[in-house]
Image (spheres, grey):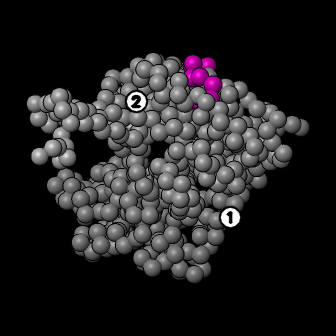
């Protein structure tokens, strides 16, 4: 039988480009390991053509009044919302995430960001400044689009991340060539078609398909002015190094090993709820996950008991069942990676396995659909009595694996939380808001929460510290990442100030 979705090709000049590939591969449904679609790798010559299409479109799009660009992007946001469930269905097939999640988070939050930046530029967000230096001289600034930008997507939030990149890019007058992850490419040309339907001119948003070699060719392309990348640290280092050689602008949103700090006075139910959201939402495949859970020694037993009670509310199952809230991992390579960490935690780190482990969820044994037996399913896993030196504590696993780290004093906890090369996110749970702000101020992370975890609204600028990234996305500061500023000094005194006047 043919795959259920039509083939995916490159998209540029405002249409699908079917004669642009010399090879193809299949993308698989993580829940069943069954083929979803044939993905046709974009040839280098076609990547050149996509960049050329974007360059051709740039002058007219960048000179279009911001309010007109805003109207087009607002229409695209409306189309996204009107097709929410259809798009969520695609995302669930592609990522394995439960429909209960994709239908309420992925498209919704992506459309929010698109609307946010459209409203911002339509309301004067690209206005510069005017400074009066002296009666006869003044300075004004303008914000100018960069040119053709490359967006490299990630597989955990495919359409959301595509919108996080393309929304401010297009709103500020740039054009984009976007490459989705090869593991989750189904959304890419659908989003391109939605932009076209909304009135985005041909060449403004383009798509290329393929694995890492396609991304490398795109990010090194001399026609690219900026690279926006979301992914793991090691890949981000290569992309940033390549971009730096070409003096390209970059935004890097990379990995994390974030600290979830439970302070001694925290409400135990809220603390456990927060820790579970920080570890098991989206099957743990979230870059900001708080996988290092610091718990006071005096609270550890109570915390673990409550955690074991609440883990029962994690419901793996048919990903389209509205009661399911936990899906498979995204791919076989990633499943193998996460399982290897769990095995290492048991056999080498010798951490105490509180729940979970290497076996697949028990619900699979009674599931009538045999295809689900082949999916990349894993149990939510909790290790306790962990130490900072353990590999499962130090390295990003990117799966539903929680490590509980007991501590004695708050100062000790802060020092240990900061003892990492990564600095993406952190959060605290406490009833004492004064103490919360004091601890947050000392945690070395770019995204922080108090008494909650994970929400990242369009209005909130987010970005990592240390090895977790460069620059920010979203919020007012997110707009600045897609423009370059020009300053102009105007002299109106009627003569040119000079030191070379006649004596």
Q: Residues within 10 Å of mark 1 (few under 14, many from 20)?
A: few
- Tell me if I can see residue 271 in this picture: no
Q: Which residue is mark 2?
A: 116
- Determine the secondary structure under disc 1: helix
Query: Residue 401: image x %, image y %?
Result: 52, 63
| Residue at the (59%, 69%) spot, across then down | 342
Q: Nearer the viewer, mark 2 or mark 1?
A: 2
Query: Residue 299: image x %, image y %?
Result: 31, 67
Q: Which residue is mark 1?
A: 336
Q: Quadrant of residue 474?
A: top left
Residue numbers of the magenta segment: 197-205
Left or right: where does residue 322 sit relative to residue 478? right
- Tell me if I can see residue 503 in this picture: yes
Left or right: where does residue 473 sit relative to residue 95? left
Toward the viewer: 432 or 182? 182
Left or right: where does residue 416 sit relative to residue 331? left
Toward the viewer: 139 or 371? 139
Q: Residues within 10 Å of mark 2 (few under 14, many from 20)?
A: many
| Residue at the (70%, 33%) spot, across then down | 11
* Magenta highlight on residue 203: yes
Say if 335 sits above or below 66 in the image: below
Toward the viewer: 247 or 340? 247
Comes first in the chain, label 2 or label 1: 2
Toward the viewer: 501 or 153? 501
């Amino acid at each position: 039988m043919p795959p259920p979705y039509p083939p995916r090709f490159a998209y540029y000049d405002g249409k699908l480009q079917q004669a642009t590939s010399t090879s193809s591969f299949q993308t698989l449904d993580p829940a069943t390991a069954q083929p979803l679609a044939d993905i046709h790798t974009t040839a280098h010559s076609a990547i050149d053509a996509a960049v050329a299409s974007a360059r051709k479109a740039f002058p007219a799009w960048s000179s279009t009044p911001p309010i007109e660009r805003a109207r087009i992007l607002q229409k695209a946001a409306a189309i996204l919302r009107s097709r929410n469930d259809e798009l969520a269905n695609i995302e669930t097939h592609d990522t394995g995430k439960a429909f209960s999640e994709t239908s309420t988070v992925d498209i919704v939050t992506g459309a929010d960001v698109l609307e946010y930046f459209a409203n911002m530029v339509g309301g004067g967000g690209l206005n510069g400044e005017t400074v009066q230096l002296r009666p006869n001289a003044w300075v004004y600034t303008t914000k100018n689009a960069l040119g053709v930008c490359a967006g490299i997507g990630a597989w955990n939030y495919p359409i959301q991340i595509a919108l996080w990149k393309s929304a401010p890019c297009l709103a500020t007058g740039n054009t984009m060539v976007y490459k989705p992850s090869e593991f989750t490419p189904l959304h890419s040309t659908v989003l391109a078609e939605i932009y076209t339907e909304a009135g985005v001119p041909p060449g403004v948003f383009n798509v290329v398909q393929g694995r890492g070699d396609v991304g490398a060719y795109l990010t090194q392309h001399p026609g690219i002015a900026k690279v926006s990348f979301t992914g793991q640290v090691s890949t981000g280092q290569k992309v940033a190094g390549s971009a730096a050689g070409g003096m390209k602008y970059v935004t890097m949103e990379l990995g994390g090993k974030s600290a979830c700090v439970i302070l001694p006075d925290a409400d135990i139910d809220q603390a456990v709820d927060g820790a579970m959201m920080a570890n098991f939402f989206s099957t743990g495949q979230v870059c900001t996950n708080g996988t290092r859970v610091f718990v006071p020694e005096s609270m550890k037993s109570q915390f673990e008991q409550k955690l074991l009670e609440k883990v029962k509310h994690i419901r793996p199952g048919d990903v389209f069942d509205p009661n399911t809230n936990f899906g498979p991992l995204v791919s076989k390579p990633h499943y193998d990676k996460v399982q290897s960490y769990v095995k290492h935690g048991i056999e080498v780190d010798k951490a105490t396995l509180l729940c979970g482990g290497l076996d697949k969820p028990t619900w699979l044994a009674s599931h009538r659909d045999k295809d689900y037996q082949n999916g990349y399913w894993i149990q939510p896993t909790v290790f306790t009595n962990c130490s900072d030196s353990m590999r499962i504590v130090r390295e990003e696993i990117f799966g539903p694996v929680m490590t509980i780290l007991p501590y004695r004093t708050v100062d000790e906890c802060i020092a240990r939380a900061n003892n990492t090369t990564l600095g993406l996110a952190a959060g605290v749970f406490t009833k004492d808001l004064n103490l919360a702000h004091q601890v947050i101020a000392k945690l070395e992370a770019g995204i922080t929460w108090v008494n909650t975890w994970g929400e990242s609204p369009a209005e909130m600028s987010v970005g990592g510290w240390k090895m977790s990234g460069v620059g920010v996305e979203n919020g007012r500061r997110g707009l600045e990442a897609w423009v370059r500023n020009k300053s102009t000094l105007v002299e109106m005194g009627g003569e040119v100030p000079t030191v070379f006047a006649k004596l």
